[in-house]
Image (cartoon, grey):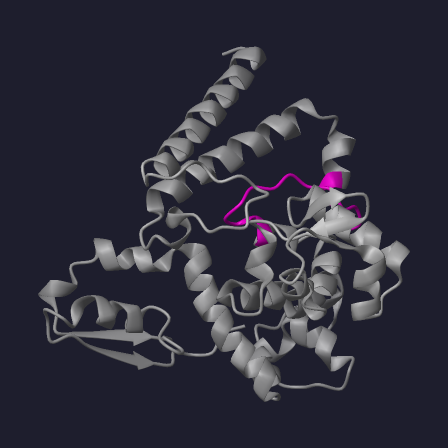
Amino acid sequence: MSNRAKLESLLALINSAAQEAISMYERTGEDVPFIDSTEPHPLDEAVDQVALKSAVRTLEGACAQLCATLAPPSHTAINVSPSYPSRAIEFQTCLLQLVQVFDYACFRVALRENITDILMDYPKGIHVNELSKIIDIDPKKLARMMRLLATRGCYNEVDMDTFANNRLSLVLHTENPARHMVNLQADACAKGAAVLYETLKDPVNGYSDDPAHAPVMFANNKEGITGTFFDWMGQEDSRRESYHYSMRGLSIIMGSLAVLTRFPFEKYSTVVDVGGGIGAVSLPARQDTQAHQGYNPRSTRGPRSS
């Protein structure tokens, strides 16, 4: 197969995956969502999103390979580097993708200042000069950060330096469980990622499998914090509660509740959810089956991990 034929194959994959995803949205009886929309689509809350996620995964992979193939290598290398804020994104998993690169710094600002919540009171948008007064951040710097996020599909620049919420930014609302997982990635996980190399080269931590020597704790140790990630997580009630909610958010992001439609629960009277936390899966499973079955889920904490 020639190189051109390989690229044509990627284009065919992109087109077929996109058409498949569009059809799934339209089969709900609603139009395909647009990024500037602030209304949820029925498919967003669907329990079983396996088919949609499969199509999106193909779309993401083909797009990424096509861009990496056609772009000069130096262009691609700098785009995936944490030091340069540029990366193609898709909805569904794009928030977690974004916080894994330099863009996480701007996301962290938006999360810490609850910008999405503020913009709920300004459906037509708010100018950065006004927004800066509310959150006490320099308006010129704020405009650059908001514009970067808008170019990534998060927030909508409705006019020069005027921003409003959109389909993606609403995931950052304080009442959305997925926000807590995004915050975990943008804050704690990013802190550990920043010192991965230093951890690997450290004479004590580098060859250790002790969770207390994980990169995130290597970073925390510099601030006088010891123990494991979970020890650190439990030191503050707000941090611990946010982590619990992040597990609910992860369930939404990963589409874990698809198990409710694909696992034969009716064959069992007891299911043990190991490491079930606050019941992100077991409680919906019970609600889904208890009407017709004496379903008795038992949640237990699994072993701690790094």
* Residue 13 within the magenta-colored segment of the rendering: no
The magenta span reads 79-95
Describe residue 268's horizontal placement relative to residue 271 as left or right. Answer: left
Task: Reply above or below: 176 against 162.
Answer: below
Q: Residue at x 49, y 12 (%)?
A: 1
Is residue 204 shown to the viewer in this render? no
Question: What residue is rendered at 49% in x and 50% in y?
Answer: 39
In the picture, measured across the screen, residue 289 lies left or right of residue 68, that is left
Q: Is residue 15 left or right of residue 230?
A: left
Position in image of residue 44 (x %, y %): 42, 51
Relative vertical location of residue 123 with respect to residue 215 in this rendering, above or below? above
Taking 223 as reference, is 177 above or below it?
A: above
Q: How many marks?
A: 0
Can the viewer see residue 13?
yes
Query: Which corner quadrant of the image does residue 242 belong to?
Result: bottom right
Residue 53 location in percent, x, y?
Answer: 41, 44
The image shows residue 61 at horizontal and vertical percentages of: 52, 35
Q: Residue at the location (84% across, 67% down)?
A: 133
Which residue is depicted at the point 67% across and 86% down? 226
Quadrant position of residue 235? bottom right
For the residue pair 154 and 215, the one nearer the viewer reads as: 154
Left or right of 152 in this view: 287: left
Principal secondary structure, stretch drawn in magenta: loop
Q: Give the percent coordinates (x, y) of residue 185.
A: 61, 63
Q: Quadrant of the C terminus?
A: bottom right
